[in-house]
Amino acid sequence: MAASARWEPAARAGEEGVLRVFGSWKLGYLRDAPALAVPTGAQRLLLLADDGLELDTAGACALLQGLRRLQRDGVAVDLSGLAPAHARLLDLVGGRMLEQPQRQIAAHAGMLGDIGRAVCVAWREALGFLSMVGWLAWEGAPLLLRPWRLRWREVVAEVEVGGLRAVGIIGLLSFLIGMVMAYQGGATLATYGANLLIVNLVAIITLREMAPLLTAILVAGRTGSSYAAQIGTMRITEEIDALRALALSPFEILVLPKVLALVIALPLLSLLADAMGLLGGGVVAALGFGVPWRQYLLRIPQVVDVQTLMLGLVKAPVFAVVIALVGCLQGLRVRGSAAAVGRAATTSVVQSIFLVIVIDAAFSVLYKMMGL
């Protein structure tokens, strides 16, 4: 039986009319969606489904489109007369249909619409990150005061994964960056006969800026993305829900060990990057610009001191907290399919690198204001 709908007037004045829906509201029977016609001036109607109504997602979509046209005309629709199964299907399809008008509006919103959406997304991401910081302070601080409750085995395992296994790539790239800085700076300094000042250039930039920043960027791309992927996969497989069902805190088991591991590992990796950057600069200074190794090594303590080293290392724990929290936040937000895991990993890398650079710039301004 083809899909159809019939309006029945109210039995008494002041009551709502009844719109009866019957027949087969399925894809094979919906050549043309039946018109949901009500008398002009009708204000309220009760939607009823006759026994034997057959409804699938295509029929629910057609029915909702007709109901929304009535609502735009000022007719209030009451769905309480539907069977629970039909009502759930309409709710499900209605939730999906709400996304389509948003996409159509977005296509015609223009530049101002793009800016508005970008601001809303940035605001939502900022609130999410602040909530993670609050979560860390609320649940992490009491645990740090009782270190015997911390899961040190997980912390050590994360230090190995996020720190020890990153030694090779960070050491190699820091060495190459030190060589590049020495080449680029030395080419200009050599024209003035100031080859020895290559040491000043490489040492100050490496210890204060380049080593901690490069290390944080590499760790964000390597370790932060893995945090997002790991926790995102656990979200899809409902392992995090299982932890909550067992009265175990996902923060204590998953988030806090990762934060502590990066706080331990990142300063050590920054020290490695300092040493390899100075080594790369020394190789270029000795082989390319005639600065003896002995003179290069003796001049480093004359140019930089422990304070210069600490000004760079103090950034590392801050970078570590940001990278770990962003990765865990994006992982906890994963919903739906495996594709969401990839999007979470990509988002975590982009946000982590952005925040690391912003925080590094803030440190530079702060050091300038403090005269350091």
Image (tube, rainbow, N blue to C red):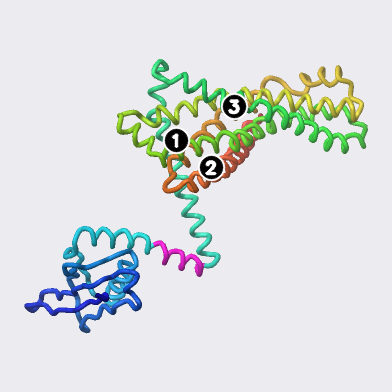
Give the mark, 3 or 2, whose residue is nearer the N terminus. 3
x, y percent for residue 225: 55, 38
Q: Secondary structure at mark 1?
A: helix
Which residue is nearer to you in this view: 142 or 309?
Answer: 142
Give the Cα distance between marks 2 and 1. Answer: 19 Å
x, y percent for residue 289: 90, 29
x, y percent for residue 249: 36, 30
Q: Residue 256 lies in what quarter of the image?
A: top left
Q: Residue 205 lies in what quarter of the image?
A: top right
- The answer to whether 50 is drawn above or below residue 312 in the figure is below
Few, some or many residues within 10 Å of mark 3 (<14, 14–19, 20+): many
Which residue extends farthest top?
Answer: 148
Quarter of the N terminus within the rendering: bottom left
Which residue is nearer to you in this view: 183 or 302?
Answer: 183
- The kind of residue on which mark 2 rests is Ala
Extent of the magenta region: 99-109
Main secondary-structure element of the magenta-colored stretch: helix
Label placed on residue 345: 2
Give the mark, 1 or 3, whose residue is nearer the N terminus. 1
Few, some or many residues within 10 Å of mark 1 (<14, 14–19, 20+): some
x, y percent for residue 62: 32, 71
The residue that label 1 is drawn on is 133
Few, some or many residues within 10 Å of mark 2 (<14, 14–19, 20+): many
- The kind of residue on which mark 3 rests is Leu
Which residue is nearer to you in this view: 118 or 329?
Answer: 329
- The answer to whether 122 is drawn above or below residue 99 in the figure is above
Q: Secondary structure at mark 2?
A: helix
Decide if residue 230 is on the left or right side of residue 350: left
Do residues under tags 1 and 3 come within 8 Å of each other at their CB atoms?
no
Which residue extends farthest bottom?
Answer: 40
For the point 35% across and 37% down, the residue is 241
Label placed on residue 266: 3
